[in-house]
Every structure is written in structure tokens, then in C-alpha cells.
Amino acid sequence: MLRKLGIGIMAAAAIVTLSSAPGATAAPAPAPERVAATTLYYDDSRAGEFKGAVAAGAEQWNSTVENVTLVRAPAGTRAEIRIIADDGWPRATLGPVRPGGSATVWFGRQAVYQGYDPTRIAAHELGHSLGLPDRKPGPCSSLMSGSTGGVNCTNATPNATEQAQVEANYGFAASRIPMDGRIVVDAP
């Protein structure tokens, strides 16, 4: 019996040794299924004098993330994100908005009158539609710090953390992340 037990222990030790030997590899875990980029349309027909800033803000997102693309809605196309210029503070529906969903960005002139950068405002508010909350207080390097980045802050590029969150919001199995739907007001 000891001989049988000894052989069993030696065989088990050999298996452990082989499986932990340098160069031995376990089967790789399957990679998550790559999803096609989500296209969200925005309607800037009511964005007034801020259409250029909205296009530049959308381009900031399009150039830094892969899982979602913001596209100006052609005439007659239903848009998920409506951009409306008004005289209040910038505010937006907190997403992440999905295809067929609905979110609104109010591009408030009050922030522009106080000296805040229009492209940063647009990219920040679109960030809300993509599911990012405010990160206040915060430095200028954080797009979602909004007004706490300061009047002289012109950074309209999402940082790596913000990019990663949007990628996750629109990545593998992202459709399970519900839209928040609250209105986020970006007054200082």
C-alpha cells in the first residue's frame, strides 16, 4: 500500500512540477467579444452660435474612444442627443444614452459669458450624455471637472480615466448599464 501511495505522490509531484515549470503555459482565457462601435447621432439644429464648438467637442470624443462615435444627424435622421443653446448654465442628461434613446445638452451661454471655453463646455456636456458624472473639484486635466478647471482652462480632451469609462459604457455587455437620466447642471 505504501508503494502504491508513494507512486501516487510521485506522479502528482511530477504533474505539479511540469505544470509549474518555466515555459509551461495554461490555455489562454477567451478574449471578450469585440463589439461594433455604437453610433449616436446629435442634433445641433438648435445649438445656435455653438454648432462649431459642438462639432469640435464631438471630435474630441471620436478621436479618443473606439466603442462609440458621435455623428451630426443628417436632416430627417432621429438623433439620440439634442443640443439646445439657452441663456442658463450648461447642463445635460446623464447617460449613457443608447441608440434609440434620448438625451439633451443645454449649451448655456452664461458660462461662455463668464469666460469658459465653448469647446470644453461642449465636450464636457457630451461626456455627460456618454455616462460620465462631474468630477468636482478637479484640475483642468480632467474634462469632467467642468467649471472647477477654471475660466482659463481650454482642455477639451478626456483624460485616460474618462476615456476608459466611456469605453466600458459602450463596450462588451454595455447594454446592461442603464441610463441614469438625471439632469446635471454645471454651475460653479
Image (spheres, rainbow, N blue to C red):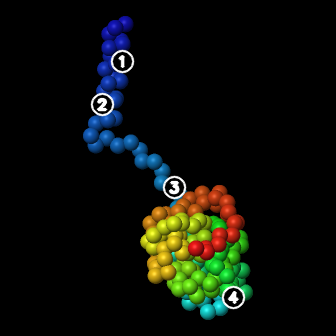
Q: Is residue 74 left or right of residue 61?
A: right
Q: Is residue 170 above or below residue 115?
A: above
Please tell me which residue lies in front, 70 or 116: 116
Where disc 2 sits, the SS reads helix
Upstream in sequence: badge 4 or badge 3 = 3
Image position, residue 161 (x, y; %): 47, 63
Residue under numbered circle 1: 8
Camera-nearest residue between 37 and 118: 118
Mark 3 secondary-structure assignment: loop
Along the polypeptide, which appears first: circle 4 or circle 2?
Answer: 2
Per the rendering, the mark at residue 17 is 2
If the image is split into quadrants, where does the C terminus sit? bottom right
Amino acid type assigned to the residue bearing label 2 in the image = Thr
**Disc on the earlier residue, 2 or 3:** 2
> For the residue marked with disc 1, what is the amino acid?
Gly
Q: Which residue is mark 3?
A: 32
The residue carrying mark 4 is 46
Camera-near label (4 vs 3) is 4
Disc 1 to disc 2, how far (Cα)? 14 Å
- Report the quarter where the N terminus lies: top left
Q: Residue at x 38, y 42 (%)?
A: 26
